[in-house]
Structure formats: structure tokens, C-alpha cells
Amino acid sequence: MTDKAQAPDPQDEEMSGQVADAVKGNWVDSRAPAWTRPYLRLSRADRPIGTWLLLLPCWWGALLAASITGQLTLRTVWVLVGCAAGAWLMRGAGCTWNDITDRDLDAAVARTKSRPIPSGQVTTKQATVWMALQCLLSLGILLSFGTLAIVLGIVSLIPVAIYPFAKRFTWWPQVFLGVAFNWGALLAYAAVAGELTAAPVFLYLSGIAWTLFYDTIYAHQDKEDDALIGIKSTARLFGDNTAVWLKRFIIMSVVLFAGAVIEALIDGSILSVLVAIGGAWAMGWHMTWQLSRLDIDDPEKCMMLFRSNRDTGLLAALFLAMSVFL
């Protein structure tokens, strides 16, 4: 179910402007109008895995809230659809901000020097305007989600703004990414339920542990370049002990996810609780599968496994969706 990374031909890449870690033949590089491509590349539309990883915690939160009532209302359906559009837009805005702040660093890393700003496809000013446009469109969706969700959405801009700088001052930038990327679990739960309880907080923490898992794998692709230019990451911090740490993150993610389910559905039907907990089991199983195939010195394998986390999150969402009707 995952995209297989293919290294683009250097000559084709130079002619098309394709980013080095994009899948060759993706829709942006092959079908989008030429004038839109630099902006879509800024938004990582040619690399959709990030949108999935931002969206799936939103779906977890909305479906967990729906499981409490056992109803998939029009409100919940709108939150699910709105989160999909919002995740695409805000992931694009966040990536644009990341590329603006990292433009000099990206130029020094083999995998990122082909990104639109360091490669000269767009200027910093053009990127800033594009980021603002995406944020405004996202705001339009957020305003339909209710007061608490709106407040949470505004607060989420703080970790989004901080994240690009985290790798400069901490060995744990993946924590900051997890804080930003999983905020949707809180926001979407609030949009459906109109309140926050311990359950979405557990779900949020589960997502952060999951992010530490998959983004450590991702960071192993760049560890040599990162070491040369002084960029910190959990991949560099853990080194040969990466597998040990990833096992810990699997356990944390599964236990916290199961805790969220039990907290939310303890007064519901046993069948609904068991099915929802099955999401934690499926998630843990898929992460364990990734760990069994990990080679931290094989960048292509790391990218493949990183991308497979779409399926990790979808499995958990599927079980939560089933629990709504039980």
C-alpha cells in the first residue's frame, strides 16, 4: 500500500525541478500546470505521506468522540472531511514555513538542496505569500468547528512555528514535531464532542510517541549530512541503540492509545471497547513489523518504512470507525 521511492535521474531532475525525495512520476511533476509546481512542491504535495501523518490523529480524535455516542452524525462527517482539507492546507503551510527557515541548511544537504527555495524555483517572498494563503484557507475551515476547536487551532501555531528551529537547540526535535503533528487529535475531538477530557489527551500522547518512532526512522536518512552541519536529531542521539528506543516508543504508543479508548468508552459496550482497543493492537503490530525490517544505514529502506506509517495510522482509524457502530 506504500509508495516505493525511486531515485530520480539527475538530468530529469534538473530539467523538471523535481525534488530529490519525491516519488518519480508523481502527479505534481507529471500533471500539474507548470506554474503551480514550485508551490505544490513547497507544500509537499508531491510527497503526500506528511499530509496523512497530520490527518490521521485528527481522524482518531473525531472517531473516538463519535464512539462515545455511537453515532456518525453529519457534524462528525463534516469534521472528518474538514480535517482532510485542513491537514492538506496546514501541512503545506507548515512545510513552506519549514523551507523558509531552513533554506540555508537545505542547500547544504544532498536530499534537500533540490527543494524549491534553495534550488531557486521560488523566492522567499513568494513562499511567504503562499504560506499566508494556505493559512487563510485553513482558518475558513477552522471557524466552522466551534469555539474550543478554534482556540486549539490558534494555539497549535505555536509548536508549528517553533519546530523548524528545534533541531538547532535540542537532540529531541522529533518531540516538537510530535507536539505539532498530533494536535489534531485534541482539536478534532473537541470539534465533535465540544469538550476535552483525559481520553483525547492520552490519544495525543500516543501520537507523539508514534511520531518519535517514525521520524527517528526518517532522520536516519540525513544523519551524515546533519552531523557535518551540526543538526541534531534522535537518529544521531540514539545511533546504534535506535532499535531499543523504537521498541520503547511502540510500547508507549500502544499503551497510551489503549488508555484513551478505555477512558472514553469504559461505560459503553464491551464489544465497542474491544474493537477500539484492536486499533492499538493493529498499530503496534505494524510498528513492530517496521522495526523488524529496519536498517538504519539504508536510506531507501528508511524512507520506505517511514512512508508505511500511513498504514499504521489508517489501521488504528479503521478500528475506531468500526467501534462507532457497536
Image (cartoon, rainbow, N blue to C red):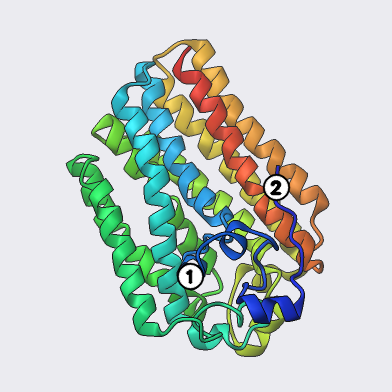
Nearer the observer, 261 or 19: 19
| SS assignment at label 1 | helix
Placement of 167 over or under 298, stated as above or below: below
Could you say where residue 65 lies in the image, as x and y percent from the top left?
Answer: 36, 28
Q: Amino acid at mark 2?
A: Thr
**Quarter of the image that includes the N terminus:** top right
Could you say where residue 38 lies in the image, as x and y percent from the top left?
Answer: 49, 73
Q: What residue is at 23 percent from the left and 50 percent from the top?
A: 140
Q: Which mark is residue 267?
A: none
Image depth: mark 2 or mark 1 in front: 1
Placement of 325 over or under 215, stated as above or below: above
Q: What residue is at 42 percent from the left and 44 percent from the top?
A: 84
- Residue 215 lies left or right of residue 33; in this view the side is right
Q: What residue is at 42 percent from the left and 42 percent from the top?
A: 58
Residue at which label 1 appears? 42
Nearer the observer, 239 or 143: 143
Q: Amino acid at mark 1?
A: Leu
| SS assignment at label 2 | loop
State if disc 1 and disc 2 touch (CB < 8 Å). Answer: no
Residue 146 in view in this figure? yes
Residue at which label 2 appears? 2
Could you say where residue 142 lies in the image, as x and y percent from the top left?
Answer: 26, 47
Q: Quote the CA–CA distance across marks 2 and 1.
A: 22 Å
Nearer the observer, 71 or 256: 71
Nearer the observer, 307 or 175: 307
Residue 183 in view in this figure? no
